[in-house]
Image (spheres, rainbow, N blue to C red):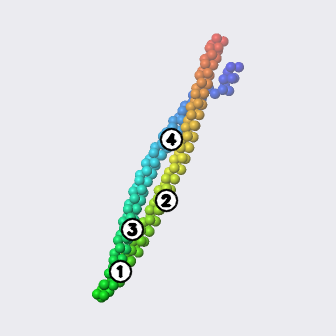
Amino acid sequence: MASKKRSSEPSLRIILERIDEQGADLKAQRRILEDHGEILKEHTGILKEHTGILKEHTGILREHTDILKEHSGILSEHTGKLNAHGSAIDALGVRVDSQTLLLEDMRSQNRATIEALEATRVALEERIERLDQDSRGRDALLEVAVRDLKVSVQQNSIDLRDLAGRVKALARLEDRVAAIERRLG
């Protein structure tokens, strides 16, 4: 009767093989977690580097916008002076109209440049914000995956401890059965 019961239960060797397989699975999951952590660190570093570059470019664009605004003011000032002296120049027979047109054209070009720089700055700020949001989303997904893997690893550890206890109990039973068989046999 003892031999019938033993044949329906998994042997100690099969149980140990299952424990070894689960241990290998745990090691593989741990390597995956470590790899994901490294990738996350690498992506975070790249994102920080790109954010720094974009912020630096935004600062440069702001400086250039300020310089262009200052030049526009100077041009306006010079245009005012030219207009004030216009009647005297007209009296002398000198034609200032072409210079005024040139200054107006320069002012118009400066305004267009300022608008283009402003649009670029706004686009860069939006891109920085988008990159930041994308990064936060990826970070959140990776964090959830890491938590899930951690829970899985913890559950596997509990299962392994439980199996180890069962294996010990089976080993003791097997020893007892062997001792009884020796006595009987």
Identity, as a three-letter code, of the amino acid under mark 4 = Ile
Query: Considering depth in this image, is 139 or 129 the residue closer to the camera?
Result: 129
| Left or right of 84, for residue 116 | right
Say what amino acid the circle numbered 2 marks. Glu
- Give the vertical position of 60 relative to 145 (above or below): below
Q: Nearer the viewer, mark 3 or mark 2?
A: 3
Q: Which residue is mark 2?
A: 126
Task: Identify the mark at residue 32; answer none if there is no mark.
Answer: 4
Q: Which residue does the numbered mark 3 point to in the structure image?
A: 69
Mark 4 or mark 1: whose residue is earlier in sequence: 4
Whether residue 57 is visible to the viewer of this picture, yes or no, is: no
The secondary structure type at the circle numbered 2 is helix
Work out whether 176 lies above or below 126: above
**How far across and how far down the image is residue 82, in percent?**
33, 79
Question: What residue do we see at 42% from left, 56% from top?
Answer: 55
Q: Where's the C terminus, which quadrant?
A: top right
Tag 2: Cα neighbours inside 10 Å, few (<14), some, or many (≥20)? few
Q: CA distance from mark 3 to mark 4?
A: 55 Å
Of the residues shown, which amino acid type is indicated by label 3? Lys
Residue at the outermost left position: 92
Q: CA distance from mark 3 to mark 1?
A: 21 Å
- The residue labelled by disc 1 is 83
- The front one of 179 and 120 is 120
